[in-house]
Image: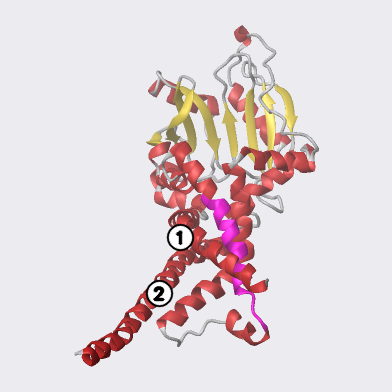
Amino acid sequence: MKKTFKKIASQLHLWLGVSSGLVVFIVALTGSILVFEDELEPVIYRKFHVVEAPKDPSPLPLDNLRAVVANAYPKQRIARIAIEPHANRTIIFGLVKGKKEKNVFSVAVNPYTAEITDTRRENESFFHIVLQLHRYLCMEDTGKAITGVACVMFIVIMITGLVLWWPNRKQTKQRLTIKWNAKFKRLNWDLHAVFGFYVLPFTFLIALTGLVWSYKWVNNMIYLTFDGKPQQKREAPANISLANAAATGKLAKIATETGRLLPHPGRIQFTLPESDSLSITVSKTNDEASISNVVDFLYFDQHDGHLLSKRLYDDETAGMKVRRLVFPIHTGSIWGWPTKALALLVALITATLPVTGVVIWVGRKFKKKEKKTRKSPAASHPTVRTRATVS
């Protein structure tokens, strides 16, 4: 019974690995690149993100900066404004045409001089392309379906791999250490099995959280488990003032009020609705929180800038708090640099597993063919002797 179970596990591990290996390799490799996206983005696109901050940094009013961008691009609507907590960073304005917000055109503005320092289309930026490859293989819904299935396969591969790896008493040391001076075949097997074992808990968690983006029912399960009900739709509350009650300096007023209500450091994002009937949403991350992805939301009247309501992280449901943990667990950003470094190492090792696995498979196929080749001459000898006897 035990042998039969291991044989089934072996076949599942082999053929699911062969089927999903290329996708797992791409997803793991792109995932490793995305781990330090926040740190590398201003390095790669320095002109877009970084400015020289004056000795006494006092940024211009946000309304003035918005007016500069609006005048420069009158045919596009400003949908988002992102403000980083560092004095030497630009303010990013996200522009869209009409209701389509997929192809965002971003404008970087020096907050001290109102100079437009750089522009770009977000779907052409390096990390956006890497993310599209990571989630969709750059094939939109078709790619999403493929990566989702590959993720499920990989979870089964990890479980069957653990079954195949599980040692008896004599094999324990062998299964936990790599014999670096061994021949290539043995070394490759060690790299696959031993490294695979050590990263398995982390890779399993990354793959499991990845299913949240692939399947809606997995996302819904979080809320049903912790809240006892499906995810509630959240949108900005209705705007209550009249359009003709518009006040000057409302964005500066909103920014000041946000700083007063949420004094902790963190990235601020304004979401400006197209409709006059909805309020402005302002989100702010809490960089002082013990874990990442802690975000508070404030809602302001878009005409006069007064506070309408707030949705603070502390008041969120258990389901929403667990859902917010999914992203930092998946990316390794949950506790900052230490867990990011671990996630990078895990992702790189995971990317090697399909490669070493294929090498093992090809080696076994070659060995079987070699055995058949060796047997065939031996099998022909009796026939030769028989013919000689007859003659």
Question: Is residue 318 on the magenta stretch?
Answer: no
Which of 26 and 112 lies nearest the eye of the viewer? 26
Q: Vertical placement of 358 versus 23: above or below?
A: below
Q: In which quarter of the image is residue 153?
A: bottom right
Q: Vertical placement of 187 versus 280: above or below?
A: below
Q: Quadrant of the N terminus?
A: bottom right
Q: Quadrant of the C terminus?
A: bottom left
Pick whichever of labels 2 and 1 is earlier in the sequence: 1
Q: Give the range drawn in magenta.
A: 150-168
Q: Residue at x 62, y 84 (%)?
A: 171
Say which amino acid is labelled 2. Gly
Q: How did the renderer colour the structure?
A: secondary structure
Q: Quadrant of residue 263?
A: top right
- Evaluate whether residue 178 shows in this view: yes
* Drawn side of residue 40 relative to residue 224, left or right: left
Where is residue 313 shown, x and y percent of the image?
74, 40
Label for residue 18?
1
The answer to whether the residues at label 2 and label 1 have Cβ atoms under 8 Å apart is no
Q: Main secondary structure of the magenta part?
A: helix
Q: Mark 2 points at which residue?
A: 363
- Evaluate whether residue 339 shows in this view: no
**SS for tag 1?**
helix
Q: Residue at x 69, y 21 (%)?
A: 237
Which of 87 and 290 lies nearest the eye of the viewer? 290
Where is residue 190 shown, x and y percent of the image?
51, 78
**SS for tag 2?**
helix
Q: Residue at x 55, y 42 (%)?
A: 84
Mark 2 burial class by Cα count in 10 Å: few <14, some 14-19, many 20+: few
